[in-house]
């Protein structure tokens, strides 16, 4: 018989309960010689090992003479196929992994007894040993008995069976994996103490396969992006990369300048890529940046999943010639910018720089003011002249993709347009849309955004342009099922990365929660995106008709 130590008592009377199984056959012998069988429901908790058990009972200690339990099932009598009801003694709460550097990863199990862990980039699984958080009598990993609490190596995909003292078995499954996406690793030079929003030279950028095989190494300039960037902050920031010569990171189109988009607010991680894909495949009247998901490591620290994206630039591989402007809600002190006379929109030079006293800024402002004067004129002949100053397809496509995403920043922020050497105005390219596509849980699928902006609201008054917008949208709408299937395909690839991103950034608030809760939450986010997008497409199908 095991010996017990009674550690807590609170006075409470209850009747004798007949024994039916191990858990209600704990015999309580009182000091007056009477005894009864104690069911598990009357025990607040039990913490057990092979040598000592602590029993927490609701009965005064002075009245307890002896506690008697049956002997545990010996190891040689364990039947691993005898799956029984889950109870305290066959519950596996978590598996923790620790490597020689002290890195600790922990997986907690959900209701379906499954859990998963994603290893950070460059972590070697062979260096990790596992420990089990359970009060079970026996632990088996893929059929081989393991020791409780001691670090040991287990396969990356393991079936774990926990056996109670009475022989009842619970089966658990755990999977350890790497992200499916390549790793972008950035290392600061010794003379750079922190990353700032200014370009700094001498950074080493390596790209690697998920297995750690290095595919390329370059010396680059590097900087943080965004007005809120802080090198000391733990937030997920955007970064800029500048190569010495045109390069093809992750086998994309050649270019010198690249952006690491954080997709910070997008729990699915796929909204921006989805916008690029829809535009390229079904619209595509303007060049669209190439992009590739990746796992970002800076100075050895894992930052989460990013989208490595071509920066909008004038170059043969991107926009071959002309001027790129963006419409913004504010400008930096050193920006070359102007406000148009009619719409009062703020236009910022992106590439090439205008030079505050250069003729390029003056001529570009004059062109935009001329276009707006004609566009907002009540004279139909003037409006016809305005239509001849633009690439109508690019404007229609810009309205369509921004309406599909319901981009509330349309023509207010991060809105690009380019002007060719012969002064033709073209909308695009599109940019980061991770905040949209119904990303806010309160976002309605109704109402227009892009169609109501300054230029679009005037252009859409033209019947032929309104029909063009509808026809371009219908091209996307007719492929609705294909787009929804694309989301499922991308989600299958992103889910592992999203789990690793969650461990690093805790965007779901579930990094320390039960393991399976994350998979359920990610699936729910994908479902919500699909439902929102389908409703949005249906609303636009009815509402965009001229």
Image (cartoon, rainbow, N blue to C red):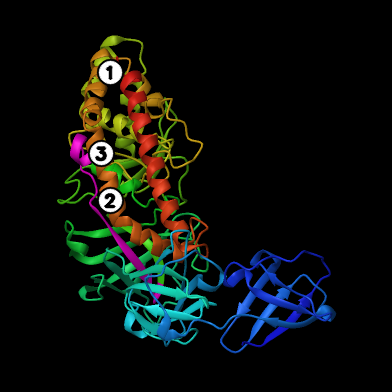
Residue bearing mark 1: 466
Classify 10 Å Cα crowding around label 2: few (below 14), some (14-19), many (20 and above): some
Earlier in the chain: of badge 1 and badge 3, it is: 1
Q: Is 287 covered by the magenta stretch? A: yes
Q: Which of 103 and 241 is in front in this view?
A: 103
User: Residue 227 — which label?
Assistant: none
Residue 360 in view: yes
* Distance between the alpha carbons at the discs numbered 2 and 3: 11 Å
Residue at the (31%, 50%) spot, across then down: 353
| Quadrant for the N terminus in the image | bottom right
Residue bearing mark 2: 490
Q: In x, y percent, where is residue 282?
A: 20, 35
Q: In x, y percent, where is residue 119?
A: 37, 72
Q: In x, y percent, where is residue 53?
A: 64, 83
Q: Which of 175 and 189 is in front in this view?
A: 175
Residue at the (21%, 63%) spot, across then down: 250
* Distance between the alpha carbons at the discs numbered 1 and 3: 24 Å
Q: How many marks?
A: 3
Q: What element carries label 2?
A: helix
Left or right: 25, with 133 as reference point: right
Q: Is 512 covered by the magenta stretch? A: no
Residue bearing mark 3: 483
């Amino acid at each position: 018989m095991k010996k017990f130590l009674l550690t807590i008592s609170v006075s409470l009377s209850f009747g004798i309960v007949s024994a039916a199984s191990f858990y209600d056959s704990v015999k309580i012998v009182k000091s007056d010689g009477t005894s009864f069988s104690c069911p598990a429901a009357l025990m607040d908790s039990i913490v057990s090992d092979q040598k000592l058990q602590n029993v927490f009972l609701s009965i005064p200690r002075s009245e307890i003479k002896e506690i008697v339990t049956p002997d545990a099932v010996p190891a040689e009598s364990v039947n691993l196929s005898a799956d029984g009801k889950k109870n305290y003694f066959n519950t596996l709460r978590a598996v923790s992994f620790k490597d020689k550097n002290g890195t600790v990863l922990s997986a907690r199990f959900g209701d379906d007894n499954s859990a998963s862990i994603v290893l950070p980039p460059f972590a070697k699984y062979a260096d990790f040993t596992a420990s089990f958080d359970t009060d079970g009598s026996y632990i088996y990993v893929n059929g081989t008995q393991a020791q409780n609490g001691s670090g040991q190596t287990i396969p990356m995909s393991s079936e774990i069976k926990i056996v109670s003292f009475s022989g009842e078995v619970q089966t658990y499954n755990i999977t350890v994996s790497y992200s499916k996406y390549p790793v972008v690793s950035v290392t600061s030079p010794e003379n750079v103490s922190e990353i700032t929003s200014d370009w700094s030279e001498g950074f080493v950028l390596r790209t690697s396969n998920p297995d750690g095989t290095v595919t390329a190494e370059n010396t680059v300039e590097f900087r943080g992006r965004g007005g809120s960037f802080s090198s000391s902050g733990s937030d997920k920031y955007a970064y800029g990369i500048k190569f010495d010569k045109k390069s093809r990171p992750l086998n994309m189109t050649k270019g010198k300048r690249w952006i690491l988009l954080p997709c910070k607010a997008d729990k699915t991680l796929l909204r921006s890529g989805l916008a690029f894909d829809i535009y390229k495949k079904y619209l595509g009247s303007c060049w669209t940046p190439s992009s590739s998901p990746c796992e970002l490591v800076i100075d050895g620290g894992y930052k989460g999943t990013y989208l490595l994206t071509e920066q909008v630039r004038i170059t043969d591989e991107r926009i071959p010639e002309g001027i790129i402007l963006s419409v913004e809600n504010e400008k930096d002190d050193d920006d070359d910018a102007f406000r148009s006379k009619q719409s009062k929109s703020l236009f910022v030079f992106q590439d090439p720089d205008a030079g505050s006293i250069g003729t390029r800024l003056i001529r570009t402002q004059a062109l935009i003011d001329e276009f707006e004067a004609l566009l907002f004129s009540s004279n139909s002949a003037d409006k016809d002249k305005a239509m001849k100053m633009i690439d109508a397809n690019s404007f229609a496509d810009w309205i369509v993709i921004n309406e599909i995403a319901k981009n509330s920043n349309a023509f207010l922020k991060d809105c690009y347009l380019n002007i060719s050497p012969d002064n033709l105005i073209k909308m695009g390219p599109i940019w980061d849309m991770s905040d949209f596509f119904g990303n806010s849980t309160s976002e309605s699928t109704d109402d227009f955004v892009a169609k109501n902006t300054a230029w679009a609201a005037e252009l859409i008054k033209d019947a032929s342009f309104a029909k063009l917008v509808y026809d371009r949208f219908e091209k996307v709408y007719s492929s609705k099922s294909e787009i929804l299937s694309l989301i499922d395909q991308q989600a299958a690839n992103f889910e592992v990365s999203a789990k690793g991103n969650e461990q690093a950034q805790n965007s779901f608030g579930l990094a320390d929660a039960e393991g399976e809760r994350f998979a359920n939450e990610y699936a729910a986010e994908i479902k919500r995106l699909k439902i929102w997008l389908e409703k949005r497409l249906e609303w636009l199908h009815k509402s965009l008709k001229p």
